[in-house]
Image: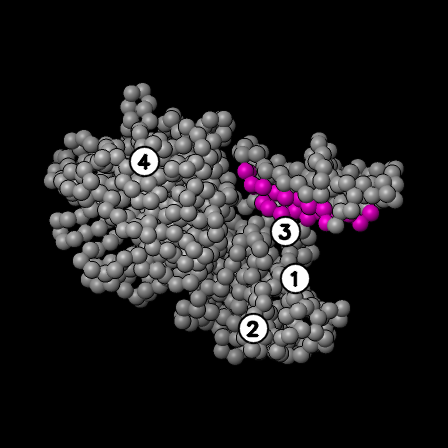
Amino acid sequence: MTPFRSRRPLLGLIGLLVLPSPLLGQQFEASRAGAAWTVQGKDFRAQFDQDGAEFMTDRGARLRFALRGVDCGATPLTLAEPSLRRAGALIALDRGAVSEEYVLAAESMEQRFRFESLPERAELRVRIGVETELVAGRDGDAIRFQGPLGAIGYGAATAIDAKGRTAAMHTAIVDGGLELTVPADFVASATLPLLVDPVVHASQTFFQSGAGVGETDIAYDQLSGQWLAVFQESVGVDQWRLRAQVLSASGAPVGGPTYLHTVGVTNWTKPRIARLGASPTFLVVAEVRIGPNDTWIGGKLLGLSGSTVTLGDSLILCRAGFNGAPLGAYRNPDVGADGGNAPGGRFTVVFEHYEPGDLDVLMRQVGADGTLLGVAPSVISATAYAERSPRISRSNGNGVGASQTFGVVYERSVSVSSGTVPMRLWLSLVKADGSLRSLLGQTTWMLSDYSTTCCHEFDVSSPTDDVNNARWLSVVETRATATQSQDLFAFVFDHQGVGFAPTNLTDLENGPSAWRAKAQTNPVVDSDGTRFTVAYQHAYSGTDTDIYASTFARSAQGTLVMHDARASIAASSDLEQTPVVCARRSGAGLPGRHLVAHTRNAGSELLLRAAVYEGLTPGGFSWRSTGCGGASMTVAGSAGLAMPLTFEQAAAVGPAGFFIGLPADVPLAVCPGCSLGTSAWTSFTGDSWTLVIPNAVGLVGAVLAVQGFEVVPGAPCLDAIRLTNTVDFVLR
């Protein structure tokens, strides 16, 4: 991999598949000052002049593009002095041999290059200079730029000829920018003009409605690398219908939404979704209502076939008089799924059971085929007080082991005195078989003694990966404080339930006083297997709320450490609200990535939107000139905890290997032009090697170096060895 250079040193390389976001039909504003145009979109601002284009999100993440050159085969095209013109949504820089065009939409900027003629029919390479303070990374042929102020996606480019034929292109990160390549065979047969067409965007809208949408949830499918979102859509007065939408790795919609049931006498609301680790099966649970007195928990099994949602059976998970369920109403469900790879995985569904004067929290497990396990729902908490609003971890953890655990958090009233009903936050831990863990003879414990009058805002994460027979979970809640409005507080505890002391996350974020004086509410939390990410709603005013995320970890000493604070997920003058967050790890995928979805109130339209958050920008790669003899090495992956990095030597002809250690720079006197770039703790043989970074929070910030070597007769070093340049990377 060639290093990407920016105006500041890069912190890391990350990857993301980015697809074009839909045109919403909203207008952007354009203004001209001298020879430059400025365009204000919904989430971004763009500026254009004769040197190129600049794309900047509302929170300050920035990319500056400048066309550096175009090669057709071995022939460089002559670029004329550009002239800037605008026609409606199109702004173009005409450069003679190529027209550099930008097509503006409300949420994205389509960058394209138009070729009316070519000197020969050969491979076409477009070289684009990029200036940015963001981190550049790739996933397939797409690029993602990530930093503390948010992220910008650069979509996988497509070549399109005049007849509408298309070809996938390769987008490479090169020294100083990007290089887009159109394959020679497509150029040879293309009907001119030819377009090279990527899309630049800040975030994604996957559904919009003027009638009403909400109650979104998401799950990850590791087989396809896609996400599946579920939500409810209004279809009449107090009538709701559930839909599902496949999302790409970047959160872009893939195909259209799928109805999960027909509109009839039943009303389905409050959907939640989870996916089994060992089976490509999703379960959606919902509160189903028939009239005012019959409320029950329904379910729907789903699968994914490519980008198509496949519908399985509809299930009655808990209804009065059915399958051992006692009389009463059932409502407010949530669902988690076994994350392990053992067969026989099951879903665990939690919900409220209401009878006049009492509320309890119950649970039911469901097999991958929809079979209800057990003769009746089991009890998590049933007392004379009211227990309500249960939340369960998305997953009980990856891998097979006795430490796999769901956390279940719920509210319990303290009294039923007139006026207010003070509440406390309680916790139970559920094993994979559905039994409750016991601590000091108890199966449920008061987690938070903070009192509220209704209603608490809280969530519980999936557990971290098992390290030394221990997993950690986190609960995050909102609390009112005397001087700082509403803050976020986190509890971290192991899979046995040990460790309840609360930590003020808003204090750990260390934001400015004006920030801390505002309310942080609606927290949602998940784990990437190592750390915890909390997404939440920040209120700037009564008419402007935005979505942010922070990543924190438990140190070896048991204290909480903030690793990434106040990352902007969605910010505009509209109301961004009700976030949900899902880690890829909760769907048995790789660590290091989350999807955050939320609702935007854009006047008469309600939009469902999604954005990827890496949790903590993986450590950066930088290269040092230590090589000799023409050996070269590439690196792929992310330098994050528990993440794999793959090193390969290109076109190795002799025995090869790699040195790894601390960065060093030792000229080798017996090897003219060669330097040893690492402390060479150890070496690995072969022309390809994958390093899985240990899952240890104490390694964050460490710098390692890797250098390749190859044994070839006549090479510069000792007449037998040639060395590659050295790559340094920071562990994050």
Q: Nearer the viewer, mark 4 or mark 2?
A: 2
Callout 4 touching callout 3 (CB < 8 Å): no
Q: Position of residue 619 (x, y in %)?
A: 59, 43
Please state, as top left, top right, bottom left or bottom right, where the C terminus lies in the image.
top right
Q: Helix or strand or loop: what does disc 4 sit on? A: strand
Q: Residues within 10 Å of mark 1 (few under 14, many from 20)?
A: some
**How far apart are the alpha carbons under marks 4 and 1?**
49 Å
Q: Helix or strand or loop: what does disc 2 sit on? A: loop
Q: In the rendered image, which residue does mark 2 sit on?
A: 165
**How far apart are the alpha carbons under marks 2 and 1?**
22 Å
Residue 179: which disc? Answer: 1
Q: Position of residue 679 (x, y in %)?
A: 73, 33
Residue 476 showing in the rendered view: no
Q: Nearer the viewer, mark 2 or mark 1?
A: 2
User: Is 589 positioned to the left or the right of 130 in the image?
Assistant: left
Q: Residue 719: which quarter of the image?
A: top right
Labels 2 and 1: the sequence-earlier one: 2
Q: In the rendered image, which residue does mark 3 sit on?
A: 8
Labels 3 and 1: the sequence-earlier one: 3
Residue at 54%, 61% (x, y): give it.
Answer: 155
Callout 4 touching callout 1 (CB < 8 Å): no
Q: In the rendered image, which residue does mark 4 sit on?
A: 408
**How far apart are the alpha carbons under marks 3 and 1?**
20 Å
- Looking at the image, residue 231 lies above or below residue 694: below
